[in-house]
Amino acid sequence: MNRLRSLVLATLLLAGAVTPAATQAAGCPAVVNSRVNAGWSSYRSGDLPTARQEFEAATRRCPGHVGARTGLGYVALQSGELLAARRWFNGVLQANPNEVDALVGVGLVAWREGDLPGVHSAFTRVRRLAPDNAEARDYLARLPEGVGPAPKRPALVLPDTTVYPARTRGDRFEVRTTRGWQPFYIKGVNLGAALPGKHPSEFPDSAIYARWIAEMAEMGTNAVRVYTIHPPQFYRALHAYNRRHPDAPLWVIHGVWIELPPEDDFDHPEWEGEFFAEMRRVVDLLHGRADIPPRPG
């Protein structure tokens, strides 16, 4: 995966996708601008050592030259020097917060680091400044659902008394209805987290979830069981179906996924803490109050 990302990035940059808006710098000698232009020519031809030499020579004569500093950021990025690349790009943005090419560089560094919220933040800013920017459009489209700022929601107000929609009584389940508690015989379907024949991280989209849920209901199912947290589109599709069918909703039986503890020690404090944290995440997401960043698996 990292090799693929590197190849995509190399193709993008060497094809000349990054073109600094201004290589000229006020107050800098003309020879400096010439060296910056030469640096970008070398960069686009794949000659990174020469590009670095030209950009460094330009910054020695004119330390604030935006084109040279941005160029050094991209040379560092192409060379796998992510910390140096971020430092160059952030230095440009401190003096020029709306410098699109440096913002693109920050987004590309975040992508290489696997920092998806950082990718979203940088390229969202790029899109505001340059709505037609191809890199912003491309990388934002690659992000999975759920990346970005949390939605605004009203403050949590706890009820005076605990109200619950389902319970066990004796050897059966019951659900609360307008007629009081009624016996509930579960006719459920287990739903895995991935598409058949696909990689586990290749989740269905909203349309597929909506179709599956409708087909479950058509076969007489009244509950769907999931063993772990699913992507947001599952919960949206289920919520949409239940709003359309208030008299015959699909109930969800939600599991909590946890790996086995170290040395099978179920009293291990770190393992137990993570187990309870995952329980809280499941409860929060079922009530629409969870902000869970994308994660593998």
Image (cartoon, helix red, strand yellow):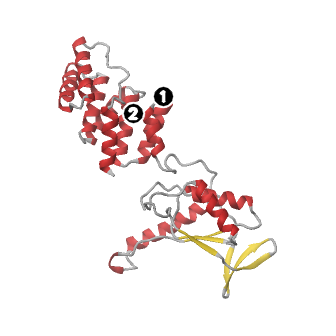
- The residue type indicated by label 1 comes to Leu
Q: Residue 236 carries which label?
A: none
Give the mark nearest the N terminus, 2 or 1. Answer: 2
Near-viewer residue (49 or 175): 49
Q: Hey, which residue is sitting farthest bottom in the picture?
A: 170
Q: How crowded is mark 2: few (under 14 residues within 10 Å), some or many (20 or more)?
A: many
Which residue position holds label 1? 129
Which residue position holds label 2? 103
In this rendering, is residue 251 above or below 58? below
In this rendering, is residue 110 above or below 132? below
Residue 219 appears left or right of 272: right
For image coordinates 27% across by 25% down, the residue present is: 40
Distance CA(mark 2)–CA(mark 1):
10 Å
Q: Position of residue 200 (x, y in %)?
A: 44, 62
Residue 228 appears left or right of 39: right
For label 1, the SS is helix
Q: Where is residue 96 in the image (x, y as percent from the top left)?
A: 38, 26
Q: Hey, which residue is sitting farthest right in the picture?
A: 179
In this rendering, is residue 195 above or below 169? above
Is the C terminus in the top left, top right, bottom left or bottom right quadrant? bottom left
- The residue type indicated by label 2 comes to Leu
For image coordinates 45% across by 60% down, the residue present is: 198
For label 2, the SS is helix
Q: Position of residue 151 (x, y in %)?
A: 57, 48
Query: Decide: marks 2, 1 in contact (CB < 8 A)?
Result: yes
